[in-house]
Amino acid sequence: MSYQAAFRVWRGDADGGDLRDYSVEVNEGEVVLDIVHRLQATQAPDLAVRWNCKAGKCGSCSAEVNGRPRLMCMTRMSTFAHDEVVTVTPMRTFPVIRDLVTDVSYNYVKAREIQSFTPPPDLAPGEYRMAQVDVERSQEFRKCIECFLCQDTCHVVRDHDENKAAFAGPRFLMRIAELEMHPLDVADRRDAAQTEHGLGLCNITKCCTEVCPEHIRITDNALIPMKEHVVDRRYDPVVWLGNALFRR
Ligand code: SF4
Ligand code: F3S
Ligand code: FES
């Protein structure tokens, strides 16, 4: 059954903008991205929106729907009452380019700052067999589609641009944890995690985990273990003594 939905969409660019009201047709089974596309096709041909797969796998269509960070292609219209106003705004944490499209380059800058996978230099191809338990541990983190909804949600940077230089955000702290857990990686990112990537700024509110469309347990399986790993390094008396002797 079709109906007309009240849509309120943020229109504007880096210089400012406002919410505009539209009445758009909705058909059974549709998602928010379908309605945004119908809006483009019928009333707002210049509406900017980023999307690719329409299947929850490319991570492009991230926005905020009624204030909640969501993938527009995975947000069913059936979750809203017919008379409810559906408000769609761009991700708040990143600078707006136009309408629903934001500049997410902060995330790529953070990705580049992390020391990449570092296997032992003398290990020849085929010399190491991964244990299944190690494969499974990192498999969860590899499900990330880089939608950056977790980055958008985290309060450390959400309304605090000034923290961005010192904080990699949950997605990239998770990447550091994944590399640190890798049995073949010989780099040690523990000090950098704390001093350069801002692990200490995370106070485990778990908001990142709540919005992850891949249901990755970012906080429990990556951030908390990484915090414990850093503490081991900083306060383990044996390590401390070893380091102290080594420094002599
Ligand atoms: Fe998106 Fe989840 Fe990856 Fe964060 S961890 S970027 S929320 S898929
Ligand atoms: Fe932010 Fe997630 Fe930590 S929301 S504070 S990174 S648990
Ligand atoms: Fe690809 Fe939504 S369009 S995740």
Image (spheres, grey):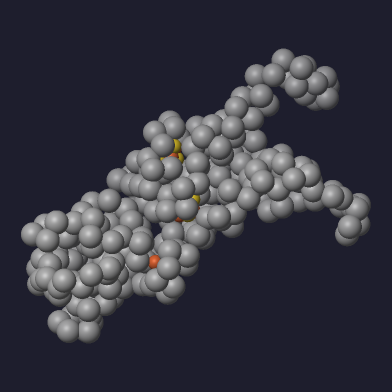
Residue pictured at 23% horizontal, 70% vertical:
28
Q: Percent from the top left, x then y, of residue 235?
A: 65, 19
Q: Is residue 28 above or below residue 201?
A: below
Residue pictured at 70% horizontal, 48% vertical:
135
Q: Quadrant of residue 25?
A: bottom left
Residue pictured at 50% horizontal, 60% vertical:
145
Q: Quadrant of residue 72?
A: bottom left
Q: Is residue 76 visible?
A: yes
Question: Position of 243 compared to 179: left or right?
Answer: right
Quadrant placement of the C terminus: top right
Q: Percent from the top left, x then y, of residue 2?
A: 15, 73
Quadrant placement of the N terminus: bottom left
Q: Percent from the top left, x then y, of residue 199?
A: 52, 36
Q: Is residue 65 above or below residue 52?
A: above
Question: Position of 235 compared to 247: left or right?
Answer: left
Q: Is residue 72 above or below residue 201?
A: below
Q: Percent from the top left, x then y, of residue 232?
A: 66, 24
Q: Is residue 80 above or below residue 50?
A: above
Q: Is residue 97 visible?
A: no
